[in-house]
Amino acid sequence: MQTDHDVVVIGAGFAGIYSVHKLRDGLGLRVQAFDAGEGPGGTWHWNRYPGARCDFDSVFYSYSFSDELQREWRWSERFAAQPEILAYLEWCADKLDVRKEFRFRTRVTSIVWDDANELWTVGTDDGRTCTTRFVVAGGGNVTVPKKNEFPGEETFRGEIHRTSSWPHEPVDLTGKRVGVIGTGSTGLQVIPEVARACAHLTVFQRTANFAAPLGNRPLTEEESRHQAENHAEVRAGSRDNFLGAPYGIGRPSALLDSPEERKKLYDEFYYPGGGFRLVVGTYQDLLVNKEANDTIADYLRDRIRERVNDPATAELLCPTDHPYGTKRAPFETDYYETFNLDHVDLVDVRTAPIEAITETGLRTAAAEYDLDVIILATGFDALTGTLLRMGIVGRDGLTLEQAWEDGPKTYLGLQLDGFPNLFTITGPQSAVALYNNAMAIEDHVELAHDAIKHVLDHDARVIEPTADAVQAWGRLAEGILNMTLIPQSPNSWYMGRNIPGKPRGTYIFAGGAPLYRAICQEMIDKGFAGFALDGSAPPVPP
Ligand code: NA7
């Protein structure tokens, strides 16, 4: 049956921009794309809080598929800030001429499979609907903020801001008493910036985090030009690296070196900074061996005690409840020194939880805090939240909520059984979260493109993973996750544990990008093993 479009693409971030380009210009498909924002940018359109910055080097956190894009764009900092990444994505959208396929300020609210006609009907919040053969969901996996858990928000006489929907106009904090809730990657970025701008800052910390210096600095013109002109050499090896950047590979085990050798190596990575190089460039067993992990955890706690003047505050900032890296490792600039400032206080809300937002501030189980501004940096319903709010209904009226009531179930994080012709870019259980997201997205868009091409080449109508393939992938992803230390974190979003009531499960593929890519390649070589075309499938890969 004729549909309005061949493909509907959701999202105008890294995933949506590339999907439109790849499917329209590569396969000649009729593409309609939607994004709730006013323009391209995705995550980088919304997260405009002070200090928002990527902690992957800009030269790696950018598209690699186009020589032209890499040659023409110049980064100004080693780790770009939000405005520059947003400008980059807007520029890419123009260069690729994809804006015209997007309807902006439009949120997708329903995606319903019509089994009789083998098409999707997509509804949007402007009351319109359209039909399409394929849907490529590229709405990001860290986009739906965690709901505010504190009663009384409506009574507060000051301002409340969420980092994930920060106002476009600058927020003036001069002379204000500010409270920040949350000390994840976002909190650690926003806290030093807010401290610089306000009269008094109270940081409400439930779980201390292991942060290491980011090592950001401006790039010289020479460096920036060198990166652009030699991008292939500069990025070589990215796809062979666990994290998707050419960061090198560490020594086999932290336990084979003496304490002095270990300290020397950690110092070499810690003091200059460099983001995730610390995780992959030091020792290979940090995420799988608790004793090895303890060596870096102790090292990082010692650095916190060195940098924070007040011993009691330093102890409160030292994590004790999870191994390093089992919650997403954050990177910081001046975070710990912020607590040496006279006008900054740290409040422990683990022992005395926040009970309510009041007319004048916040109340914890132990005290009242008077505030003019409250900043919520409390995290996201990550990995599944974006898809679950799109009103997706597959075969036989099965909703995505029903399909995932015990946690996500996917094949390669790309497709789900019962939801034909629907592709989830960097969906749950793909090589996401522990992988440079820009590159993970590129890989996945190409995989979706290859799958759609496979359908078209075979004059088929629908592609969908078999139930066996989904089960096998779930078992593999779970098995690999259980070989790491990640399950030892009580509240990591890697396992859905940061949201009360969210099903616990395997939300990421923790085997690393090279293994994930090898599995996908084998799947393709075996004729899209694990996927069925019009109901008929080749055997599941061993
Ligand atoms: P995170 O890493 O989930 O951090 C959220 C923070 O908010 C974390 O410190 C939480 O403490 C805290 N939080 C959440 N709920 C509460 C309540 N009820 N009381 C006190 N504190 C609370 O989110 P981010 O935005 O920082 O980072 C998300 C990702 O975005 C990041 O990893 C990058 O990939 C981009 P908790 O640890 O739950 O005790």
Image (tube, rainbow, N blue to C red):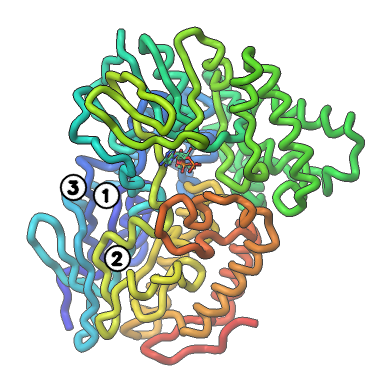
Q: With 383 as the anchor, is 98 left or right in this view?
A: left
**Picture layout, residue 115 above or below residue 17:** below
Q: Which is in the foreground here, disc 1 or disc 3?
A: 3
Residue bearing the label numbered 2: 28
Of residue 257 and residue 114, the one placed in the foreground of this image is: 257
- The residue singled out by tag 1 in the image is 98
Mark 1 vs mark 2, foreground winner is 1
Residue located 62% across and 14% down the image: 310
Front residue of this view, candidates 148 and 191: 148
- Give SS at disc 3: loop
Disc 3 residue type (three-letter)? Phe
User: Residue at 27% across / 19% down in the picture?
Assistant: 372
Residue type, numbered disc 1: Val
Of callouts 1 and 3, the N-terminal one: 1
Q: CA distance from mark 1 to mark 2?
A: 13 Å
Whether residue 73 is situated above or below residue 63 in the rendered picture: above
Query: Which quadrant is home to the C terminus?
Result: bottom right
The residue at label 1 has a CB less than 8 Å from ligand 1: no
Quarter the N terminus occupies: bottom left
Along the polypeptide, which appears first: circle 2 or circle 3?
Answer: 2
Q: Secondary structure at mark 1?
A: loop
* Number of marks drawn: 3
**What residue do we see at 66% from left, 24% from top?**
304
Q: Which residue is mark 3?
A: 104
**Where on the picture, by quarter, is residue 85?**
top left
**Callout 2: CB less than 8 Å from ligand 1:** no
The numbered mark, 1 or 2, whose residue comes first in the sequence reads 2
Residue 364: horizontal and vertical position, in percent? 39, 31
Res. 522 visible in picture: yes
User: Which residue is at the far left?
Assistant: 127
Residue 307 spot, x, y in % from top left = 65, 17
Apparent side of residue 540 relative to residue 191 in the rendered image (left or right)? right
